[in-house]
């Protein structure tokens, strides 16, 4: 076991080298920053034309005007309070804003590590020989950083929630999860699982935080803006049609989503009529949600339960991209300190699979959902094994009262 001062040195050295590498990749134009274009344009709209923040025609026209038609355009669909954060960046030139967002997101890795240092200090061969080094070899994190996505902030808020939870502050943990509602599709199932597990104080914290971000959003865009945002959410969900035209118009490609929805669509669901596909997705999602909720609620180990809630939320999210799998870093760290069969193999799949399939484009990203599902099954298997092991210690013929005492 390393002392805290000694364990921080490799992490900080790796962090500096990582930041230099990211900036070098930008200078060499290794990646394009397509997603950040929509965030930058949203910041411009939030500053100059709030009433059209969620108008797709305006978003498209502005992005084409700023960046040209070559790179296409991407829909901005985050809640209004998220756009407020983007306003200061929109005051700068695009290149400067992108570099500052990159530096900002890389900097957030440090508080992520500090808030959940217990989770990120376990040895995880070969991905984490020293505390915190798993950050710098996880490819989804690189994707999130280079695209200017909010995935690192989501990870930070989950680390903060874990930090508060370990100190018995369920209200604060629920509050932090509510602040993560800029990623609605992950934050909502995560909050549901967390509330089922931790109860009324977690619910009170989440409701309070939701009220805060809702009030801020309403103040910023008004009733009309909130209605437009809700309308855009419905359009992006593809509940009214799943054609290639609808996917291209909204920028929603299920094959690009490493979650249950993407897995169903990619493994044959695309050939079903739209109404059938929607019904199957919603039904299977509801069943999986209830199953994961049962596992989380019945799990005795706090770290395992929180890890399972995060993994379940990612798998159940209706819309995520490869960069959002950055959030897997925390549950993998939490589970690393608990020996489980096949866990190293699943972790390796989480690290290696994105590298193998990303070059094939958006058509096979859904395959990344397989190791995510594997982690859920791993915890479920461990739960069943623990129950069977407990039951094996109950002696036949012993009174029920004695058996209960043994449990």
Image (spheres, rainbow, N blue to C red):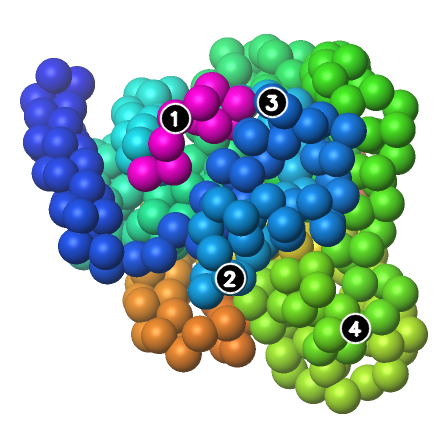
Mark seen at residue 269: none
- Which image quarter: residue 293? top right
Which tag, 3 or 1, sits closer to the chain's start?
3
Q: Residue furthest front?
A: 65
The residue where tag 4 is placed is 242
The residue where tag 1 is placed is 92
Circle 1: element type: loop
Magenta segment's dominant SS is helix
Q: Nearer the viewer, residue 352 or 256?
A: 256
Q: Position of residue 390 (x, y in %)?
A: 59, 49
Circle 4: element type: loop
> Would you place residue 351 above or below residue 9 in this image?
below
Circle 3: element type: helix
Mark seen at residue 47: 3
Which tag, 3 or 2, sits closer to the chain's start?
3
Question: What residue is rendered at 50% in x and 72% in y?
Answer: 362
Q: Please state the extent of the stretch shown in magenta in the rendering.
A: 86-95
Foreground mark, 1 or 4, reads: 1
Q: Position of residue 117 (x, y in %)?
A: 31, 26
Q: Position of residue 393 (x, y in %)?
A: 58, 50
Q: Position of residue 69 (x, y in %)?
A: 51, 61
Please state if 397 lies on the left or on the right of 141 as rendered: right
**In whole angstroms, how far apart are the C-alphas of marks 3 and 2?**
23 Å
Q: How many residues crowd around disc 4 within 10 Å: few (fewer than 14), some, or many (20 or more)?
A: many
Q: Nearer the viewer, residue 135 or 377?
A: 135
**In whole angstroms, how far apart are the C-alphas of marks 4 and 2?**
25 Å
Which tag, 4 or 3, sits closer to the chain's start?
3
Residue 376 shown in magenta: no
The residue where tag 2 is placed is 69
Q: How many residues crowd around disc 2 within 10 Å: few (fewer than 14), some, or many (20 or more)?
A: few
Question: What residue is rendered at 52% in x and 15% in y?
Answer: 164
């Amino acid at each position: 076991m390393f002392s805290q001062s000694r364990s921080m040195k490799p992490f900080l050295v790796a962090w500096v080298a990582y930041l230099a590498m990211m900036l070098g990749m930008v200078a060499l134009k290794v990646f394009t920053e397509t997603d950040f274009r929509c965030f930058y344009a949203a910041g411009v709209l939030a500053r100059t034309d709030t009433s059209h923040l969620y108008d797709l025609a305006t978003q498209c026209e502005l992005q084409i005007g700023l960046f040209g038609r070559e790179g296409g355009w991407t829909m901005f669909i985050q809640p209004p309070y998220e756009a407020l954060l983007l306003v200061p960046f929109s005051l700068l030139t695009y290149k400067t804003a992108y570099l500052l967002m990159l530096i900002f997101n890389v900097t957030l890795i440090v508080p992520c590590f500090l808030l959940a240092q217990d989770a990120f200090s376990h040895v995880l061969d070969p991905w984490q020989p020293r505390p915190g080094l798993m950050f710098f070899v996880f490819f989804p994190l690189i994707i999130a950083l280079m695209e200017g996505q909010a995935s690192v902030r989501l990870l930070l808020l989950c680390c903060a929630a874990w930090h508060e939870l370990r100190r018995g502050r369920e209200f604060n943990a629920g509050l932090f999860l509510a602040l993560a509602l800029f990623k609605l599709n992950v934050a909502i199932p995560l909050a549901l699982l967390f509330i089922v597990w931790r109860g009324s104080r977690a619910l009170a914290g989440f409701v309070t935080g939701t009220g805060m971000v809702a009030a801020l959003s309403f103040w910023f865009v008004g009733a009309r803006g909130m209605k437009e945002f809700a309308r855009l959410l419905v359009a992006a969900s593809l509940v009214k049609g799943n054609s290639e035209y609808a996917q291209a118009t909204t920028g929603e490609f299920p094959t690009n989503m490493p979650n249950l929805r993407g897995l169903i669509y990619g493994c044959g669901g695309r050939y079903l009529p739209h109404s059938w596909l929607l019904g199957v997705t919603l039904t299977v999602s509801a069943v999986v949600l209830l199953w994961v909720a049962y596992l989380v609620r019945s799990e005795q180990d706090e770290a395992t339960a929180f890890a399972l809630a995060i993994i379940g939320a990612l798998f159940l999210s209706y819309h995520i991209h490869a960069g959002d799998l950055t959030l897997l870093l925390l549950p993998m760290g939490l589970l690393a300190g608990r020996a489980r069969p096949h866990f190293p193999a699943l972790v390796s799949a989480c690290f290696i699979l994105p590298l193998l399939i990303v070059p094939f484009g958006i058509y096979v990203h859904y395959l990344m959902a397989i190791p995510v599902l594997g982690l859920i099954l791993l915890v479920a298997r461990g739960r069943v094994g623990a129950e069977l092991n407990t039951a094996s210690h109950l002696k036949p013929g012993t009174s029920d009262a004695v058996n209960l005492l043994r449990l």
